[in-house]
Image (spheres, grey):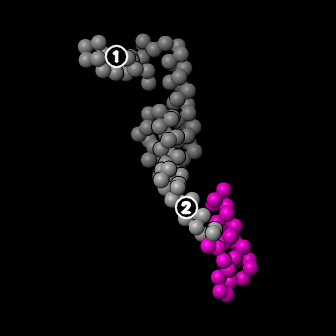
Amino acid sequence: MPLTVNVVTNELMPKPRFEWTEAETKKVQINFKTINTLHCALTPTEFNKVSSCIAAKQVWEKLKIIHEGTSQVKESKIALLTHNYEMFKMEPGEDITSMLDRFTNITNKLS
């Protein structure tokens, strides 16, 4: 939503719609179309988490955190998977197929 500065309080506030330029109107339309597209692709639980966002960028950033976690969480996951990869060995009584499945899961999560 386009913003303007209130001359009395010197604060940013939403610009009245009748003052929007053609470019601002176009940006708002694109933003709402993008938000609508993202909302249509979400599960009800995901939608509830992002429904208060007013910009497509906010929706996207929140979804990234929901699905990938913060950078600290990502680093922790990578460290754990790297440790699992380095310590990987066949378990007693485990067949080759099960071992290969475990190994493939670790390497796929690392990539």
Q: Quadrant of residue 50?
A: top left
Could you say where residue 34 lies in the image, as x and y percent from the top left?
56, 33
| Other residues around mark 1 within 10 Å, as few (<14) / some (14–19) / many (≥20) | few
Left or right? Give the position of 101 relative to 11.
right
Could you say where residue 100 lies in the image, as x and y percent from the top left?
72, 73
Q: Which residue is mark 1?
A: 5
Which residue is found at the position 44% from the left and 24% from the top? 1
Q: Nearer the viewer, residue 65 or 36?
A: 65
**Range shown magenta:** 87-111
Q: Which residue is mark 2?
A: 79
Which residue is found at the position 53% from the left and 36% from the top? 36
Could you say where residue 96 lies in the image, as x and y percent from the top left?
74, 79
The residue tagged with tag 2: helix, strand or loop? helix
Q: Amino acid at mark 2?
A: Ala
Which residue is found at the position 68% from the left and 83% from the top? 94
Q: Amino acid at mark 1?
A: Val
Question: In which quadrant will I find the C terminus?
Answer: bottom right
Could you say where residue 101 lies in the image, as x and y percent from the top left?
69, 72
Q: Is residue 67 above or below residue 4?
A: below
| Other residues around mark 2 within 10 Å, as few (<14) / some (14–19) / many (≥20) | few
Most extreme residue toward the right is 96
Q: Earlier in the sequence, mark 1 or mark 2?
A: 1
